[in-house]
Image: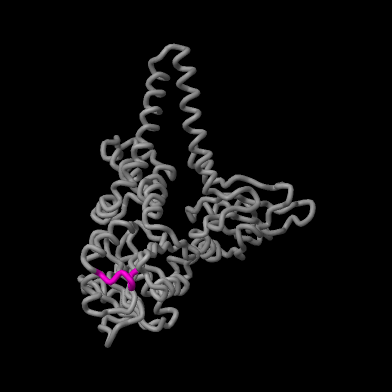
């Protein structure tokens, strides 16, 4: 890939452009908002000048409901030889492209599984997609060349390509992305009626629960509407569990001894299922999913003790999945191992280095975990949140 055009210079589009420009791809920036283009260009994401001819790939970074219209418009202008989008819904936009008569051979749906609470170009990063899944949903009409160019895009951005059927993708993101955002927003709305003294008690657990609620409400309404069927199905299942939890709590508050016993067991069962579900995406002891990495931090000297390290980790507001202390009988000044989510590894490393720590990065499967599991401690942030 030598040239590309990014249509839409928000967080995702500008991050794509930054990554491509950093790899030497001539990248043209297009947006209805000229201020966004100027900001993206000032960040080094590319040029606001139009291309002199068709580029190798056009990346359409607009809301789901605008994808088909945008693809149709720029295909007519012959902007590129291949097209992909980054919308978080795939089936509906593709069907709309077909209805508008788009050239489906040069189009492949795409969705990088990365983002943030804010949507503007100022928060864009060239490394936003590093080691993150990038889903592609080729249809039967998609040409081999178009898919190959899209796969090269993911590679240039440092992402891990995943190929899925469009409907399978939409069901998956309804569960792991769209539902969590909706719950964060609905939970955040409860705070509007909270007493001031209650809000002052809010800690990290509540802040984590509502973190994504700060996203663009209009954009997220567009996303949820475009994936209404899949989100509605998983929301109905959650609503049933919420109903069972509410009924159990009512019996615990007002029922007799036998009712309270049954209700307690039902509530415990619901919480246990939640823990079991979380374990499916959490790393196992000593290894873990590919979305986790080990950080090895040198601990030597009176000012570089484990408790000081934990204090600096807590200040950085990054939760730990596991911590491995050195074996004092063998190597008391050995490094401390920290297992963290891959997307937080870089900011935590930088924060610790700024505080004078020597940090090395490893892989989730090759961390400093003793074979017998000795020295393992659960991350303090999780326990602090529970308290």
Residue 69 as seen in the image, left or right of residue 327:
left
Front residue of 125/317: it is: 125
- Which residue extends farthest front? 140
| Residue 123 visible in the picture | no
The residue lying at 33 percent from left, 67 percent from top is 85
In this view of the protein, which residue sits in the foreground, 31 or 134? Answer: 134
The residue under the point 42% across, 83% down is 24
Residue drawn 62% across the image and 51% down it: 323
Indicate the quadrant containing the N terminus: top left, top right, bottom left or bottom right: bottom left
Q: Is residue 149 above or below residue 242?
A: below
Magenta highlight on residue 295: no
**Residue interval drawn in magenta:** 102-107
Q: Farthest residue toward the bottom? A: 52
Looking at the rendering, which quadrant does residue 361 occupy? Answer: bottom right
Vertical arrangement, residue 157 with respect to residue 87, above or below: below
Choose top left, top right, bottom left or bottom right for residue 364: bottom right
Residue 292 figure quarter = bottom right
> Is residue 42 shown left or right of residue 326?
left
């Amino acid at each position: 890939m030598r040239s590309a055009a990014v249509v839409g210079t928000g967080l995702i589009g500008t991050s794509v452009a930054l990554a491509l420009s950093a790899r030497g791809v001539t990248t043209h920036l297009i947006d209805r908002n000229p201020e966004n283009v100027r900001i993206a260009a000032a960040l080094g994401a590319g040029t606001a000048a139009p291309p002199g001819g068709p580029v190798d790939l056009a990346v359409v970074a607009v809301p789901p409901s605008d994808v088909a219209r945008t693809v149709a418009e720029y295909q007519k202008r012959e902007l590129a030889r291949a097209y992909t989008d980054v919308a978080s819904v795939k089936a509906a936009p593709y069907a709309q492209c077909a209805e508008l008569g788009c050239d489906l051979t040069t189009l492949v749906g795409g969705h990088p599984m990365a983002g943030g609470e804010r949507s503007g170009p100022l928060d864009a990063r060239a490394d936003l997609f590093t080691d993150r899944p990038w889903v592609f949903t080729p249809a039967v009409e998609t040409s081999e060349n178009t898919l190959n160019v899209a796969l090269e895009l993911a590679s240039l951005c440092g992402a891990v390509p995943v190929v899925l059927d469009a409907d399978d993708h939409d069901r998956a993101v309804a569960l792991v992305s769209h539902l969590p955002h909706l719950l964060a927003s609905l939970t955040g709305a409860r705070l509007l009626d909270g007493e001031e003294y209650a809000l002052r008690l809010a800690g990290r657990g509540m802040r984590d629960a509502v973190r994504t609620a700060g996203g663009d409400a209009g954009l997220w309404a567009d996303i949820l509407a475009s994936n209404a069927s899949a989100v509605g199905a998983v929301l109905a299942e959650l609503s049933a569990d919420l109903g069972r939890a509410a009924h159990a709590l009512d019996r615990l508050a007002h029922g007799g001894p036998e009712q309270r016993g049954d209700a307690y067991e039902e509530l415990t069962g619901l919480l246990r299922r939640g823990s079991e579900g979380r374990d499916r995406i959490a790393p196992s002891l000593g290894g873990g999913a590919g979305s986790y990495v080990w950080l090895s931090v040198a601990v030597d000297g009176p000012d570089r003790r484990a408790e000081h390290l934990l204090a600096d980790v807590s200040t950085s507001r990054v939760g730990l999945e596991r911590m491995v202390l050195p074996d004092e009988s063998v190597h008391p000044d050995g490094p401390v191992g920290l297992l963290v989510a891959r997307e937080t590894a870089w900011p935590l490393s930088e924060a610790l280095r700024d505080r004078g720590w020597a940090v090395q990065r490893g892989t989730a499967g090759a961390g400093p975990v003793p074979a017998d599991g000795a020295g393992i401690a659960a991350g303090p942030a999780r326990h602090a949140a529970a308290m």
